[in-house]
Amino acid sequence: MKVMSEYDADSILARETFEELFKIEDEFDQADRLIALTERAFDISKACGENFKKKVRAFKKQLEKEKKEQKGTRQPSKTEFGYYADGHELNCGTWIANQNGVYQYNPYGIANLACYHPILITQIFRNAETKKQKVKIAYQVAGEWSEIVVDKSLISSANKITALSEYGIHATSENAKYLVKYLSDLENMNISTIERKVSTSKFGWIGGDFIPYGMKIEFDGKERFQELFDSVAERGSLEKWLECVKTVRGSGRKEPLVYLAGSFASILLSQLDLLPFVINLWEETGKGKTVSMMVAASVWGDPKIGKFMTDVGATGTSYEVRSDVLNHLPLMIDDLSKVKESYKDAFTDLVYAWCSGKGKDRSDQNLGLRKSCTWNNVTMTSYERPLATESMRGGAVNRVLDFQIEPGDIFTKETGNATVTAISKNYGFAGRMFVDVVKTVGIPRIRELQQFFLQKIDTYCQMHDQEKEDKQKLPLSILLAADKLATDYIFKDGVYLDFEWCVRQLKSKDDVSENQRAYESIMDDVNIHVNNFNPDDNGNYRGEFWGGIKGDYVYIVPSIFSQIADRYNFSAAAFLRWAKEKGILKCNGEKSHELQKTERIPAGSKTAKRFYAVKMRNEDAENSDESEFEEVNKQTKLPFD
């Protein structure tokens, strides 16, 4: 619109001036504009002002006449898109919605354009986890219908709805508010017509349904996770897949059976109210771990890396989001060494998250807590060494099953290539089959089977005098139960996991004790930095002064001890309490709070200092010099007391 000073006697009386004036919808804004124009007309001349007032009255009469004629003309009360095969249309009120687009006449007979092409809401979803709503929108551009699912909030705001333009929908800042109004009217006028469904953005069990195989619940995360969603599918021939996998199972190698059992076991955890765990196959590269994992991935979908199997280049947040979407389906990550290289010190946190089934809490744009990513599945990895040694958090390590690959290659070059070729063309059938097995057998009987294997593991350990960690036994019992179900109902080949081999792979209680592993880490660090504890013949240290060794004990400077704890990711306070209870921590007294020992180090020092005195492993103690340090008498007065 022009500013007032730009109007002259001709332009202020032109028809376009009045059209612009009465196109203003807000009555206050329209009145302000009318007053300003009237004043400008009289400023030009009295005659111009009088003529302007006459034209205002004339234009109003013309609009009223057009409005009456418009009311007398029957407007369509339903859409005319032809979207539904049965021919039914949606109520659209005063909107005209046909192949020419969607528009509406305002009270002055001027069309408000909502969209240049057909567009409508076809379904409304209510997410089972978040309770938030999404809508499925169908739209026709260039004669072709397409569908998308978007958050309800996106079509409820004129500022947000322009994002639909990315999908080819006509949604600009000019028509945004009308498009919002049209879609809102469409929803409210067709409450009983538009289909409403429960939805989820997760795979797995939702109530008695299993996504993506269930029909009652819709997966609403296709747009965000299109590649992953597309990978969970059935392709090729079930018979060819079974022929290939049975050949692998009959090869005598145990490793593919472990991954296969883990792939099936993943969907049992939530049904048995059990926690997530990790299966890690470890040994040097080139053994066939990748192909073994691909076989397990083909249970659910496309086994290629970057499809169902995870790309190792993913970030921590993307791992969490992927686990959240997979939910009960297994997370598969090949070659974990690349992941550890990227994560460095945060790698332990990632392993701990997989085992805890929960991602980090994060704030949203409104500084509130965003819904955390959660899952309950089996994470399957491959590595060059046991994964449990990488994490010093006992709760996580307890649920990491490390399986060492036996000598020799799992596949030859020929059999490996043949397997990859077969499962890349034929996949996704066994997942649906196993879901049906779970439903048919029933959770009570599956729980009995899992408890049977748990008891069998306990009995075996007792008979062979093996003290295995209880929390390691539980994941293995689930693995064995899943293996039996898949073998009996799907493969029917009688090839089961080697029970004794699996039990031998379990960690002992000392192996998974956080404090025991902390002790081993301390001793290793002392050996690596022995020069920091032993002075030369002149009493000088060849590195930083970290403490000293006397008899069976290593005396560690408290600040250095804290650094070791940080480096190996264990709790210094928890270890020291444990060490005192075990009798391997020498203290000044018997008081429960006393954890330090005072010594003059090196020998001959004028002042005594406090240290943490930890008993060394026997092989270390043999090399110590008993006479190197002078023990401080309990009566000695310390300068820092």
Image (spheres, rainbow, N blue to C red):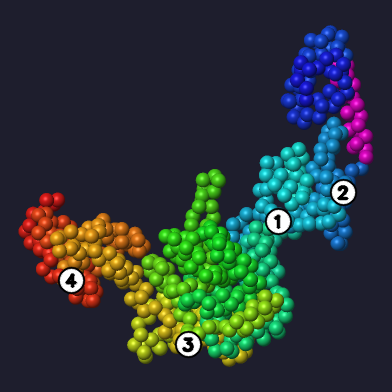
Mark found first going from the N terminus, 4 or 2: 2
Mark found first going from the N terminus, 3 or 1: 1
Name the residue carrying label 1: 149
* Amino acid type of the residue tagged 4 in the rendering: Ser
Q: Nearer the viewer, mark 3 or mark 4?
A: 4
3D distance between C-alphas at marks 1 and 4: 71 Å
Decide whether residue 3 is among the magenta residues: no
Name the residue carrying label 4: 624
Nearer the observer, 481 or 597: 597
3D distance between C-alphas at marks 4 and 2: 92 Å
Tags 3 and 2 touching, CB below 8 Å? no
Q: For numbered disc 4, what is the local secondary structure?
A: loop
User: Which residues make up the magenta segment?
Assistant: 52-73
Q: Which of marks 3 and 1 is in front?
A: 3
529 with respect to 512 (left or right): left
Mark found first going from the N terminus, 3 or 4: 3
Q: In this view, does 157 lie above or below 225?
A: above
The label shown at residue 98 is: 2
3D distance between C-alphas at marks 2 and 1: 22 Å
